[in-house]
Image: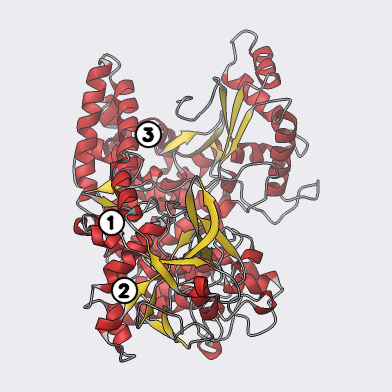
Amino acid sequence: GAARLGLNAPYLPIFLRLADYARVLQGNHTLALESYLRQEFKNRYSGIPHQEEFLSAALRNGACMILLDGLDEVGDVSEKLSTGKTLRQSVLAEVQAFSNQRYGERCGNRIVVTSRLEGYQRGDLRGFAEAELSLLSLPDEVEAFLLRWYTAYIAEYDPKLTQTAVVAQARANVDKIMDSISRSDSVKLLAINPLLLTILAVISEIRHTPLPNRRAALYKVVADTMITNWRRAQTDVEKSRIYQKDLNETHIYSVMASLAYWLRENNPGGTMPKEKWSEKIAELLAEYIDKDEITGVVTEFMNHALLETGLLTYKSETQVGFFHLTIEEYLAAAEIVSKSKQRAVSEKYWQNLSWKEVLLLTAGELEQQHRREDLAAYLAGFLDFKPDKPELRGWNVFLAGRALADMGLNSIGKTNQQVIKHALRCVAQGFDIDIEKRNQPALYAPTLRADCADLADELGYQPDDLYSFVKIPGQDKILPYWMAKYPVTNAQYNRFLRPENFRDEKLWTGFPKFGEFNEKNSEESCRELGKWKEEGWDWLQEALKDPDWQVENGVLLPRYWRDARFGISRPNAPVVEISWYEANAYCKWLAAQTDSPEWAALATFNLQPSNLVFRLPTEDEWVLAAGGVENQRFAWDKDKATEKEAEIYQRANVQGQINRTTSVWMYIQGASEPHQIMDMSGNVWEWQANCFGTEYGGQKALGLRGGSWCGLLDIARVSSRLDGIPVAWVNIGGFRLCVLPCAGISR
């Protein structure tokens, strides 16, 4: 544990739910987080001698790891406390104050705050390093996660087993579930999420049946399993006495769903005092139980839910909630669908980010019940909603798109599919979705635009002109040439990843060599000076043998190929993490693919296939296609450079606004002037054919142009340059194709 996390010393872990602290803070507005922590520690370890002194010493000496869980569960209530702050603001202020006192050079405690993405805004907590838990990669990370989970589970379930036996049994279980995962693309999408993967493992262990391939179906299986045999499967208890009161699993399921919706509406933190639960259960059971028996049955029902099904659990001495927020959200969705109130609920809560999962799972439950018309109406309804706050503009489109992607296109009719897909593209490209305002720019949050673009891609969108080229007229010493409209995408590069292409030495040698770029279009800069030799082939042989690189069946994959942020799961994002050699090899390979869509696009210019060269652009060619370097302009500027940051963010993926690459078709408002070429400012730096004039470790550096998703906005100007050695590979670099009618380009 500690070694794997890179910790040099053991820490005392202290776990606190921020929702519990928030509940107490509502009644005692001056209660400091550390005071609450000390009281909770005392309650948990009452009777242990000197525990208060022990905790004080641990905090003072920096020996604690404080885990503050579920900031998103605190909510953001509009009512203000006597301090003048909302409850969420108060909790954040107390976390900040505690961190300022107990973390730093003088005090080395570790403080970790967790939250769903929609419950945290960047910069909420000063001095905290922000990290997003990435999805797991298949198969390696998923398999490693399962092996650790099963090893821990089996060791705890049967402590008499030897370590060898535990590992052997865990390995067998992992092999079984990995086989099940590999058989379904839908299950693969679930498995890369750590929470859902854990649930898959639990269900596989208990049911021994095929895994569901939809989230709503998976959660229903979890709830059904826990109600019927979760505890019996693990503890061999007899069937609960609750069933003797003419209550079956269906009744219990219905009551639990009603409880989940009641809790969701009344306490976003997910807990209520036990007596409140009893009151609500009595109200719900009145439909099934005689009045004179209700008190006893309520007690038995609470025991059943807490001790036998495990659906409910104590979150503190007096507070009860669902064992996991995800199950609460699913059961609330099941209640919404059972009462057919999905339209009213979505209209009321779509702007409340804490209801996101409930609304998505409502769609999943409708699909699971084969209510196709109701589902189509539910999704279409989102597009009619208007936000109260500008920052939520487009969120309704995202919800409709995310729900459709979760269930698959065929869950609704083609007309409704097209309406949602069109709305996603409008938001992604920064246009109004209103038909009457079509093609009018509209402001959306950059991350929301990127998410909508990813959803459009997930639903099968690909721009019609993805493989097209733009003719660039010659200038000075540069002959006319054709520049690819888009950077090379993951989907395009995927065609190259075949074993024979990594055995063909001709693809990896003889790349055209150009001199150092200068702004005067010198002969050395514009004219091919010769050929590279075997450098690319020699590098490839070493890379294929390197255990740290991703090699499959003799194919060298881009280093982030399986990464959810950058890899092939995002087909229309630019390929990144490839060397200059790989980019050149791709160009040479594509030159021979005369049946490719690129060749079909070039045929529209009446070019002769026998007289074409495919390669990286020189810096002169790239700058010309981007419209020139005058006035420190960005690629889209017609004359004067854009100055307002908001306008730049509308046109380019820069400065970490989105924290990943974006689909190459997204920034249509940032297309270059006058040639309308995409992504020449921002998204990824693009390899150039020219040497840069610098060396690192004896290797000549090559040029890159265009700026990137994490680079400062100023270096996305056309004039900006970067250098990199040919073996360099980073997640901010990609490339684009240039095609010429002959090998030379000088006049």
Q: Residues within 10 Å of mark 1 (few under 14, many from 20)?
A: some
- Per the model, the C-alpha gap separating discs 3 and 1 is 33 Å
- Mark 3 or mark 2, which is nearer the start of the sequence? 3
Q: Name which of mark 2 and mark 1 comes first in the sequence.
A: 1
Q: Which mark is residue 321?
A: none
Where does the image place residue 13, in percent across and percent down from the top left?
Answer: 55, 25
**Residue at horizontal 40%, vertical 39%?**
311
Q: Which residue is mark 2?
A: 412
Which residue carries the number 1 mark?
Answer: 186
The residue at which mark 3 appears reads as: 304
Residue 370, placed above or below residue 468: above
**Which residue is found at the position 66% from the left and 24% from the top?**
39
Left or right of 621 in this view: 254: left
- Callout 2 secondary element: loop
Q: Is residue 481 left or right of residue 166?
A: right
Tell me if residue 94 comes above or below residue 561 in the rendering.
above
Q: Tell whether 527 sits left or right of 413.
A: right
- Residue 503 in percent (x, y) is at 21, 55
